[in-house]
Amino acid sequence: MFLPRLYRIFFIVCAVLCANLAQAQAYPTRPIRILAGEPGSAPDVSARVIAQAISGPLGQQVYVENHPSIMTGDLAFHSAPDGYTLVQNGSAHWLSVFTQKISWDPIKDFAPITITDRSPAVLVALPQFEAKNVRELIALAKAKPGVLNYAIASPGGPPHLSGALFREMTGVDIVPVPYKGGGPAVIGLLGGQVQMMFAPASAATQHIKSGRLRALAVTTAQRFVLLPDVPTIAESGVPGFETAANFGLLAPGGTPPAIVKRLNAEVVAALKRPDVRQNFLSAGVEPIGSTPEEFIAVIRKEMETAGKVMRRAAQ
């Protein structure tokens, strides 16, 4: 009795594997859409570069469909897990569990494909700001508790986490000022409404290079490729400090593993092409490429860090 049952299990597994292989070989047979945020947003820019790069290798049109960023996760969650609807989003997608009421789980209900690109937040201030580096900022903030302030570009996103983690790790009392998006926050900083900001590198780099803003430090563990002369916060007196805005491509949960593998291979290959890499760098972000397993590990780590910081900040 045991052997026949074992044979049945073996044949069922083989049948499933063969079906997945056949499905992957046939895929895709029609256009693929990538859900992304508002036109011009970081996920939208990334999605358009990716769509153009993989349409040829896949033999089907890959196009971007724009929606308000807050809706893309929900739309993807309610889409068929067949590889024809994908979503390009950033850390805000999986950190939204801490700031919004959502009906889906960012880990259980999605199949990560690859990290496509990464961008640090950059701690920036106006050129005339009294502190010229992180050490001077910490000393100034401790001398004037509750006086200094900084803009938050998007509550719940990586810049928000960067500010909360900075306050926690340095013990400074600086006041967060929320804005509705990175653009308004940068405008507020340039207009002198706030004194500093943890700005997305894609939004701040042009102003840093023009001299309108001074970069005090970047939030990643290593220096940012587009701002090699700007130190990290970790090397500026706050060891262990690290945050980044990771962006990646995901599919609805339940998408066949063979299709996820095919998409991963095509996107990662595209990210190694010089023209594609240059398109990402021109947008102010660094192309990455990862395995699905590496992607899910990053998601879990960010959710763990964000959860701890935000819970302590709310106390």
Image (tube, helix red, strand yellow):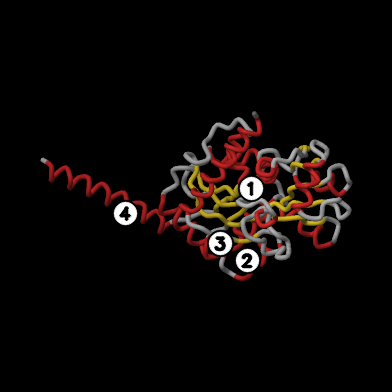
Residue under numbered circle 1:
36
Q: Find numbered disc 4 in the image and state the secondary structure of the residue it sits on.
A: helix
Residue 277 numbered mark, or none:
2
Q: Residues within 10 Å of mark 3 (few under 14, many from 20)?
A: many
- Quarter holding the C terminus? top right
Give the CA separation, mark 4 to mark 3: 25 Å
Q: Amino acid at mark 2?
A: Arg
Q: How many marks?
A: 4
- Quarter holding the N terminus? top left
Horizontal side, residue 15 vs residue 285: left or right: left
Horizontal side, residue 154 vs residue 128: left or right: left
Residue under numbered circle 3:
54
Task: First in sequence, mark 3 or 1: give its number.
Answer: 1
Give the mark toward the camera: 1 or 2. Answer: 2
Q: Amino acid at mark 4?
A: Cys
From the top left corner, tell me how far across and down residue 229 is, in percent: 73, 65
Asked if the residue at tag 3 contacts the one at tag 4, i.e. Cβ–Cβ closer than 8 Å, the answer is no
From the top left corner, tell me how far across and down residue 44 is, in percent: 67, 51
Q: Find numbered disc 3 in the image and state the secondary structure of the residue it sits on.
A: helix
- Residue at 63% of width from left, 38% of height from top? 71
Q: Amino acid at mark 3?
A: Ile
Which residue sits furthest bottom? Answer: 274
